Amino acid sequence: MRVTFVMMGWENLSIQYISSYLKQRGHEVQLAYDQSLFDDKNYLSMPFLAKILDQGNNIVKQTIDTKPDLICFSVMSVTHQWALKTAQEVKKHINVPVVFGGIHAIICPDEVIEKEQVDIVCLGEGEYALAELLDSMGKGPIDTSIKGFYFKSAEGEIIKNEKRALIADMDAMPFPDKELFAPFIPIKNYYLAVTNRGCPFSCSYCSVSAQDAVEQELENFKKVRERSVDNVLEELRTNKVKYNYNWIDFRNPVFSPSKDWILEFCIKYKEQVNVPFRIFSHPLLIREDTSIALKEAGCFAIQMGLESYDPDIRNKYLHRKESNDQINKAIRIMEKVGITYSMDYILNIPGQEEPELRAVGKLFSELKYLYRVSPFLLTYLPKLKINEYAMQEGVLSPNEEGNINQGLQGSYMDIGSDMKKERRRTMETYKLFFRLMSFIPRWMKRMIHRTKAYYAFYYLPFNFILRFFDLSMVVRDYDASAYARNYWWWFTKRFDPKHPAYFFNKLEARGPKNPPNDRFTSKLSPAEENSF
């Protein structure tokens, strides 16, 4: 069977893992991809340029041209509305079952299956579930009793099946199918990888925590399911030969909670791969011995989530139990070792006030190896604990919570969630101040903080200054420079007649739609009727 994944904005490792497994099972996998230049829900948001370069029709044409038996969207909350719009346009031309999966569908399956564009919702990991679904389609009408899915029958009846067990052995999975994205992503610029699934922490603002709440009763559930060091290195060696990538971006929420795993990895990585890499970490996981090992192995940056420097807010609203002493210890270790690092910080948390922001601004201004501060305006995502606290504080209304579950909120990379005008300007002022710290020497940081000169940002055009800072990062930051190279590559492909994203590819007018899809049985079997 032929399945087409439809994706926008950035490379997706989940799709790559699913693709490898499906190909292993004999199915054909295609990708329809829209880079959504300047509205990629990931790094840049410039509505004027995004409108000029919009290729909504192109992604529909790509999807149709693959002649799929099944169409799949891996959906995050910020891409949910895009996926619905795209699926609706595709369905005007072909009658093919549409599956929505990904973290938004896992967390909000009831809201997703109600949409007329969606025929099937995948309730968890897609490898085994989609393989069984495609096997079923190859034999005739879809078996709507397959675990791990919600189905919508031809009559519109919703069939809710139980979830599947999680994958127990990460090493049993084939390596991600980079070849699927190679026509759309210049993989040489940087290599995206993960070494585990899950996260050892339960932060109230993170969708991984909401996913844990959904999956914690499932068979094989663990907070972290880790690949072996040798399995990870085999993937990296194999694809280094194939793609000759410049550096590796490990995108796990945290690189590894295991000290022994990190030390083994660093020794072998230096010998077998030896290209620069970046990791994500947490203050409670920063140790001196592992930091030294990471630096010697080629780690050029640790991205650490600080999020709030007020211990009461951090504990009450964010479910972050570390103390300021533990945070400061982690920072001292990285400063002592001399490994460069960045810190994420959330603005507009309920109860957050200026004294906290001034205090953390002072901290940032004193640090030598802090090469970037990444401030984000808080975005409320579906079914999170922090939403409950915001409701109690009167920050969110029931209507706003409903919109959040439909993916109608702003992006954390852009405007965040709604707030009052005066508070927004204050938070934007500190966001610009913290971003400025990526470009100026320590003496200037200290001077600006001491004189409160950052208040000038209150009166300056926020979006213009922020975009200027974003673009300035290109000359001094691995991540930003790679993103800029990718953007140029994507832009040039828009004018390559041989590329699927060619700007002047037109969606041809079509006649009546294909006959109604007969993949679904017309009504439930007696066994299915008895299961409710």
Image (spheres, rainbow, N blue to C red):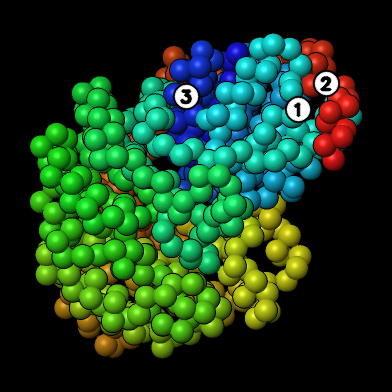
Point out the tag, 3 or 2, that comes first from the N-terminus. Answer: 3
At 67% across and 18% down in the image, what residue appears? 136
Image position, residue 316 (x, y; %): 51, 79
Between residues 8 and 225, which one lies in front from this camera angle?
A: 225
Q: Which residue is mark 2?
A: 521
Displayed quadrant of residue 310: bottom left
Please tell me which residue is depicted at 23% across the width and 76% down the height of the picture.
329
Task: Note whether 523 is above or below 430 in the view shown.
Answer: above
Find out whether the residues at labels 3 and 1 contact each other: C-beta distance under 8 Å: no
Front residue of 7/461: it is 7
Q: Is residue 100 above or below residue 440?
A: above
Which residue lies at the image location 22% right of the left edge and 83% below the top edge? Answer: 447
Q: Position of residue 137 (x, y in %)?
A: 68, 16
Q: Is residue 397 visible?
A: yes
Disc 2 marks a residue whose amino acid type is Thr
Alpha carbon separation for disc pair 3 and 1: 22 Å
State which quadrant residue 123 falls in.
Answer: top right
Residue drawn at 68 percent across, 55 percent down: 405
Vertical order, 121 against 103 (above or below): above
Q: Which residue is mark 3?
A: 21
**Secondary element type, mark 3:** helix
Secondary structure category for the residue under label 2: loop
Amino acid on which disc 1 is placed: Thr
Mark 1 and mark 2 in contact (Cβ < 8 Å)? Answer: yes
Disc 3 and disc 2 in contact, CB within 8 angstroms? no
Q: Which comes sooner in the sequence, label 3 or label 1?
A: 3
Q: Report which residue position mark 1 lands on.
A: 144
Dot 3 alpha-carbon crowd within 10 angstroms: few under 14, some 14 to 19, many 20 or more: many
Using the image, tell me which numbered label, if any, was put on residue 167. none
Q: State the quadrant of the C terminus.
A: top right
Quarter of the image with the N terminus is top right
Q: Amino acid at mark 3?
A: Tyr
